[in-house]
Image (tube, grey):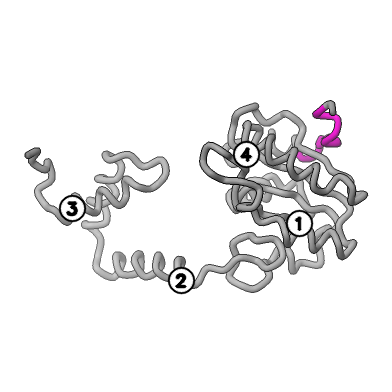
Amino acid sequence: MELSKYSSKLLEEAVEVFAGLPGIGRKTALRLVLFLLRQDKEVIGRFGETLLRLRDEIRYCSVCNNISDKEVCDICASPHRDHSTVCVVEGPQDVMAIENTGQYHGVYHVLGGLISPVDGVGPDDLVVSPLEERVKKGEVKEIILALSPTMEGDTTNFYLFRRFRDSGLKITTLARGVAVGGELEYADEVTLGRSIANRTPFEETFRF
């Protein structure tokens, strides 16, 4: 039987929990746990309480499906945004990345994922219905497909294009300034901003 290299079972369990987070290896997890152990009980208590509140109280905007504290997020509720232009993204992290560019002033729709048969994610697993409702109301003139330039992103782009191409909308996609195969959230702000500003009609990216 292999002996644990940790002096405490609780310590080992905490490291296992942190190591389960994306991008966190066991060494980093150990450093984080040891850092927390050095903090006051009040700090640890606030940390734990915040995580519980995040899990129990977080909401998703009823309009765009982005993370929000309210029924309708601040972006969707803002009269200063262009509500006729909807930027479709995979997740909340992409909204944050695009907002950081300062180059986009429309609104968003968050799909909550990308089509990936390998991972068992199909079209029915995406949040598309709220976007269709907005389109049916006639308030949308352009849909920007701002998904990562990966196989999954391109597959999802094509699915959405086919779903909305007969609606009379202008459907565009990001200019290929973002590296092919890269994740949108990791693109630098200048490149991402230019990709939005120089977006192109989606049908020009494929030949049917």
CA neighbours of label 4 inside 10 A, class few (<14), some (14 to 19), many (20+): many
Whichever of callouts 2 and 4 sits on the residue coming sooner in the sequence is 2
Vertical relation: 115 (above or below) 79: above
Span of residues in magenta: 196-206
| Quarter that holds the C terminus | top right
First reached walking from the N terminus: tag 2 or tag 3 = 3
Neighbourhood count class around disc 2 (C-alpha, 10 Å): few under 14, some 14–19, many 20 upward = few
Q: Quadrant of residue 190?
A: top right
Q: In the structure shown, which secondary structural element does the residue marked by tag 1 occupy?
A: strand
Specify which label sits upstream in the sequence, 1 or 4: 1
Question: What SS does tag 3 mark?
Answer: helix
Q: Which residue is mark 1?
A: 107
Task: Give the vertical position of 153 relative to 67 (above or below).
Answer: above
Specify the quadrant of the image occupied by residue 110.
Answer: bottom right
Q: Is residue 204 magenta?
A: yes
Figure disc tally: 4
Q: Which mark is residue 56?
A: 2
Q: Which of label 2 and label 3 is nearer to you?
A: 2
Query: Mark 4 — residue?
Result: 184
Residue situated in front as seen by the camera: 120 or 198: 120
Q: Which residue is mark 3?
A: 11
Dot 4 amino acid type = Leu
Measured in 3D between alpha carbons, the distance from the residue under mark 3 to the one under mark 4, in whole angstroms, is 35 Å
